Each structure stands twice: as structure tokens, then as C-alpha cells.
């Protein structure tokens, strides 16, 4: 009788272990999905119509996961619109010659990039022209593109 109970207990423990492993696998799968969806694509920006804006830097956010620049752009009537310019990671920009001090609040810059498809004052950076005439690429650009 004892051996029958021991066998039943082993089967029950095996079932518990399999359920625990399945739950852990599901949890890991869910966490990977969250991580993958957190890294968004550039589909929100219309890369077929380059946009060029000029303005005064309000903030340069040199941090993970992506850098961003906030600039104030004045129209011909004097109305100021605050734009957010999204760029690449610190590692990529560093390899392209950027540093934390490349852009400073108060700098007047010219940005070329892809505007947000929804018309919001936001864009994905392609190049930035600095006050001293230096042009910074926001991602590696292939010749002829």
C-alpha cells in the first residue's frame, strides 16, 4: 500500500513540476514580448517626405534608449511650436562623432528628417546642422541615399 501512495505522490510532484516549468516559460515569453514591443519602429514617421526645420534648442536628452532634442521653432507670424526630435542610441551617435556636449540649450540648429505621420510636431532625425557649420548625421547614411 505504501508503494502505491509513493508512486501516486511522485506522479503528483511531477505534475506540479511540469506546471511550474510551464508557468515560468510563459512568464519569460511574456517578458520577452514586453521588451520587444518597448523598442518601437520608425513607422510613425514619414520618411518619403523630408522635412527641414530650424529652431533654438530647449533640451538635449543624451540618455537611453534613444537621444532626443527639443527645439522651439518660430513661424513667420512669431508663433513658437515646440518640436521633439528623436534620434539613435548613445553608442551609435558616439560612433558618428556625437558627444553629450555636441548640442547645447540655446543653440540654433537646422534639422532634416522624417516628420510624424500624424502631423504632430515631432520628427525622426536624419542630419543636424550646428551653429559652427558642422553637420552631424543621426544614423549611418549610405552613399547616394
Image (cartoon, rainbow, N blue to C red):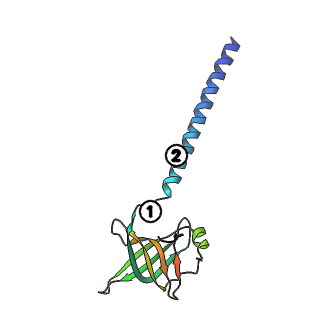
Residue closest to the eye, 61 or 47: 47
Residue 49's x, y, as percent? Answer: 36, 70
Front label number (2 vs 1): 1
In which image quadrant can residue 50 be found?
bottom left
74 sits to left or right of 24: left
Residue 43's x, y, as percent? Answer: 41, 61
Marks 2 and 1, how far apart in space? 23 Å
**Which secondary structure, mark 2?**
helix
On screen, residue 107 above or below 127: below
Q: Residues within 10 Å of mark 2 (few under 14, many from 20)?
A: few
From this viewpoint, which residue is outermost toward the left? 77
**Which secondary structure, mark 1?**
loop
Check disc 1 and report the residue beneath it.
42
User: Which residue sits at x=59%, y=77%?
Assistant: 100
From this viewpoint, which residue is outermost toward the top? 1
On screen, residue 131 above or below 5: below
Check disc 2 and report the residue beneath it.
30
User: Which residue sits at x=47%, y=82%?
Assistant: 57
Residue 139's x, y, as percent? Answer: 52, 70
Q: Residues within 10 Å of mark 1 (few under 14, many from 20)?
A: few
Amino acid at each position: 500500500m505504501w508503494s502505491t501512495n509513493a508512486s501516486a505522490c511522485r506522479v503528483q510532484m511531477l505534475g506540479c513540476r511540469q506546471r511550474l516549468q510551464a508557468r515560468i516559460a510563459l512568464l519569460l515569453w511574456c517578458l520577452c514580448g514586453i521588451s520587444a514591443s518597448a523598442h518601437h519602429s520608425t513607422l510613425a514617421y514619414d520618411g518619403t517626405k523630408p522635412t527641414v526645420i530650424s529652431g533654438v534648442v530647449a533640451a538635449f536628452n543624451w540618455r537611453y534608449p534613444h537621444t532626443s532634442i527639443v527645439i522651439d521653432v518660430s513661424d513667420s507670424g512669431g508663433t513658437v511650436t515646440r518640436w521633439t526630435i528623436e534620434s539613435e542610441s548613445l553608442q551609435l551617435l558616439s560612433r558618428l562623432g556625437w558627444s553629450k556636449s555636441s548640442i547645447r540649450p540655446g543653440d540654433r540648429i537646422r534639422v532634416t528628417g522624417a516628420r510624424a505621420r500624424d502631423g504632430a510636431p515631432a520628427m525622426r532625425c536624419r542630419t543636424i546642422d550646428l551653429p559652427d557649420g558642422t553637420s552631424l548625421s543621426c544614423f549611418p547614411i549610405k552613399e547616394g541615399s
